[in-house]
Amino acid sequence: MMSTMTNERADSPACATASLGNYRFHDLPDPSKWADCVHCGMCLESCPTYEQTGEEQHSPRGRVHLMKSVGEGKLELTPDLLDPIFTCLDCRACTMACPADVDVGGLIEQVRGQLRQAVPLTGWKALVSDVFLKGIFPHPSRLDWLGRLLKWYQKSGLQTVARKTGLLRVMPDHLAEMEAILPAVGTPVRRKYKHQPLIKAKGETKRTVAILTGCVMDVMFSDINEATIRVLTHNGNDVVIVPNQTCCGALHVHAGDRETGRKLAKQNIEAFQHVDHVIVNAAGCGCMLKEYPELFRHDPEWHEKAEQFAAKVEDVSKFLHDTGFKPPKAELNVRLTYHDACHLAHGQGIRQEPRALIESIPGVEMVAMPNADRCCGSAGIYNLTHPEMAQAVLESKMQHVPQEVELISMGNPGCMLQMALGVMKHGRNQKIVHTVQLLDWAYQKEEGKDVRI
């Protein structure tokens, strides 16, 4: 028997707590997401994990078959499913390749929610999840303190001592490598503009926008948030730093903690309810915000609110492109290549807009990257939870990065860290930059400021 649901639609409120084959927990998967898969194999070449393993269970169609089998009562929700379901990078490349548009990524996230209820985390993994995903990321004040601690570690000389004395060797190799490419921690814009929540446009105000400051983004990449604000104001936008905003919840949903994801989504929906544009400079965050309606498909009231919110969310590159940004006049004179972040290219369908921004800058020479939309292996914190697979995927990615460029541009912080790791491990001296930083540098040079790239 396929399901105990005889009279309920898959998206009805009652379905949230009914059962579907051997899926028996709250927030059931949507069977329509696997219904159109005919296992044709068109997805295989697009999948980074299948490329590495050649194993059917690590392919999109293999994962769909497993998830569908649980829904049909042929398989149980057991620990045996953890590896194939959680080894998926959720890069969405398979959906782009699928002739039937099967939403494998959305299905993966729904089934992870079921698996995490059936097989809860234990031991150190549970501790890490409770401390970081639940205890720190959703709380801006705690994130600020983490940022202060990291900044002190970098500025006090402790980082230099730790690196020179070999103290970092006590850490697992993948953690020591991540420490080596940590960016310099600055002052979060959320704190910097606490008493000045509105940053006025330069010249005539054309519109007012809000910016998602993010969690990790504002701690580790506050300079990119600053650049985003400068570029937006340069193009006639008043920028609002909305109070009470929080983490987007992407890391939680990817990890199967959909309940925390919903709590964070509700907070953000309410925080941004009085603005018309929510500008995002992190591809993963933007994709998550646009998919808030999916989290509330069993809750009509919040689903409607999430739909209204998602319609406001815009990636900064697409927003600038679509609203008529000012092409810079100053030259940068650099040679660079562009990497498509998965959740920008596959998740949001944004490919040409970032390239158009870059190509508008005088003196920039674009060198095409083969397979530019191939995953780099970052996938949120995948490089921490699955370091071996992440490294294998990164190694494959680096084979396509042109040697002759000075800069590698992209639109996602996780990708920036992962690609910086690839550059370091390959002994290259290329600099990793966010697309919006390039515009910011050109605008600053245009104003006569000294810019060092």
Image (tube, helix red, strand yellow):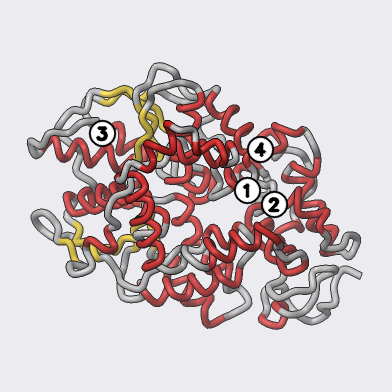
**Image quadrant containing the N terminus:** bottom right
Q: Are marks 1 and 2 in contact (CB under 8 Å)?
A: yes
Q: Would residue 289 be found to the left or right of residue 48 on screen?
A: left
Residue that numbered label 4 is attached to:
389
Give how far across and how far down residue 247 sits, in percent.
44, 64
Give how far across and how far down residue 31 sits, in percent.
75, 64
Residue that numbered label 2 is attached to:
86
Going by the numbered disc 1, the residue's amino acid type is Thr
Residue that numbered label 3 is attached to:
360
Q: Nearer the viewer, mark 3 or mark 4?
A: 4
- The answer to whether residue 128 is above or below residue 161 is below
Residue that numbered label 1 is attached to:
385
First along the sequence among labels 2 and 4:
2
Q: What residue is shown at x 37% (from left), y 43% (from top)?
A: 158
How much space separates mark 1 and mark 4, taking CA atoms? Answer: 9 Å
Q: Secondary structure at mark 4?
A: helix
Give how far across and how far down residue 412 sits, in percent.
43, 45
Q: Quadrant of residue 351?
A: top left
Q: Nearer the viewer, mark 1 or mark 3?
A: 1
Q: Are marks 3 and 4 in contact (CB under 8 Å)?
A: no
How much space separates mark 2 and mark 4, taking CA atoms? Answer: 12 Å
Going by the numbered disc 4, the residue's amino acid type is Met
Going by the numbered disc 2, the residue's amino acid type is Phe
Q: What residue is shown at x 41% (from left), y 41% (from top)?
A: 182
- The answer to whether residue 441 is above or below residue 110 is above
How much space separates mark 3 and mark 2, taking CA atoms? Answer: 40 Å
